[in-house]
Amino acid sequence: MAKPRGAPPLLHPRPHRRLLRSPISRCACLLLAFAALLLLSSLHQVVRVDVSRTDPPRQVSSDQLWASNGYGYHACVTPTSGYKVQGKSDSYMTVRSNGGLNQMRTGICDMVAVARLVNATLVIPQLDKRSFWQDTSTFKDIFDEPHFIKALEGDVHIVSDLPEGLQSAPRARKHFTSWSGASYYEEVKELWKNQKVVHIPKSDSRLANNGLPIDIQRLRCRCLYQALRFSDLIEDLGKKLVERLRSRGKYIALHLRYEKDMLAFTGCTYSLSDSEANELRIMRERTSHWKLKDINSTEQRYEGNCPLTPNEVGIFLRAMGYPESTWIYLAAGEIYGGEKYISKLRSYFPNLVSKEMLATKEELEKFNNHASQVAALDYIIAVESDVFVPSHSGNMAKAVEGHRRFLGHRKTITPDRKGLVELFDLLEKGDLMEGPKLSSLVTEMHKYRQGAPRKRYGSLPGSKGRARLRTEESFYENPFPECICLTGRH
């Protein structure tokens, strides 16, 4: 049977524990049964003595904690020799980008690639103002619009707005099929035969992760990592905050997904009070576009679908060997429960800082009520961090990981949430204590989850039809091999 994606290579505790609990055969003699029980009891005591040590985690070298190794791989986005400059087109494509910041960013770059495939002029996309964050920012509030247009001028013709003569012209409206390939867009071209303008109401995940021409894949990378630069206001403050962090030493950027909407959407209520769990349930039921309402929180957690709690993150990072003095930048929105839960993480790492602690009140005033612009600051600080750790997968976690791979495989530690739950439960029962034994188990579990070069994962075993496309690793999470090459090879 194929090993599940990201499964820990050595830790398989469940079969062993079931073996110890297996009943003694009824036909065994009483003396043998009594002796076996004594032996099991003594072994249990030995195990408890071994794993219940409360010593500090084992010492780990600085290189093991902070160093990354790209093994000679580097970014490669130069078009192939057959790639031609695209001229102006009198067919226009308008787009409404949907979702949060990073869902919009990747969607915009998908639309750039689609405009190339259908030979249409792309009008600067409208941003989502109706999502959970209710951000009224326009494209040029978040991105450097002139740079975006200029950087892609040899790939796609992009304009700020429709020509005056087409402002009130009738428009076709088309929902592109998710994860579509180049052949699909060859057929879609026909839309522009009868209409000058086609409007696309959603931009997310409209292109396949795999199987596209290499020049289209490299165009997606040039767009996301080079052309779609943040506005000067955001870039300048982001760089200042990175410098202020670096003046204190190396730092971890922690994307802590423990906001109210995240917990409500996933149905994850472990460690919360009954009243908090009920508050999240009500929010989920009242949010009409969240389709799943009845969620078993326990099942979610054991399947690895829940974000780590602040306390679990503290346990995890200490077990990985990071000392108490480590600086941690909190890349997150408002943490649910506030200080009640964040204090548990701070008890492990007192040097826990946020943008509100690094920036002055005056510096942040310009970003008030603009969640996407604030998220852009977090993105810059996360990409530039010495180590990036996401507590849950999501659009930002995937985008940051992919960007860090593109920049030389900067260290990104992706927690094995499903594997960690088993260890956290042993801690809770008292069968395991924080210390060298836990550190050994956790570090072994994450040996191959630290952002080293590898090809993008395909669909999960057993997935069929179009449903399999949903299980593929996102192109923007790992643009290897199309946009990452070995030194000297392109």
Image (tube, helix red, strand yellow):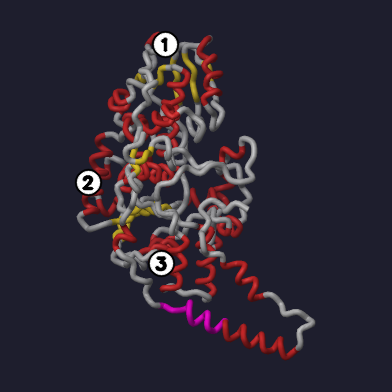
| Residue at (72, 91) in percent of width and height | 31
Q: Nearer the viewer, mark 3 or mark 2?
A: 3
The residue range painted magenta reads: 44-54
Distance between the alpha carbons at the discs numbered 1 and 3: 59 Å
Q: Residue at x 36, y 50 (%)?
A: 331
Residue 49 is a magenta residue: yes
Q: As shown in the figure, which amino acid type bears the numbered disc 1? A: Asp
Q: Is mark 1 on a helix, strand or loop?
A: loop
Which label sits on residue 319? 3
Who comes first in sequence, dot 1 or dot 3? 1
Measure the alpha-carbon separation of dots 3 and 2: 31 Å
User: Quick check: 296 above or below 291?
Assistant: below
Residue highlighted by disc 2 = 240
Q: In this view, does 133 lie above or below 63?
A: above
Q: Where is residue 75 in the image (x, y as percent from the top left)?
A: 34, 38
Instruction: Look at the numbered disc 2 and give the secondary structure of its residue.
Output: helix
Q: Nearer the viewer, residue 45 or 257?
A: 45
Residue at 49 percent of width and 21 percent of height: 199
Mark drawn on residue 215: none
Quadrant occupied by the C terminus: top left
User: Label 3 is placed on what type of residue?
Assistant: Ala
Residue 329 visible in the displayed image: no
- The label on residue 90 is 1
Vertical side of 87 occupied by 452: above or below: below
Where disc 3 sits, the SS reads helix
Q: Which of marks 1 and 2 is nearer the N terminus?
A: 1
Looking at marks 3 and 2 on the same chain, the residue that comes earlier in the sequence is marked by 2
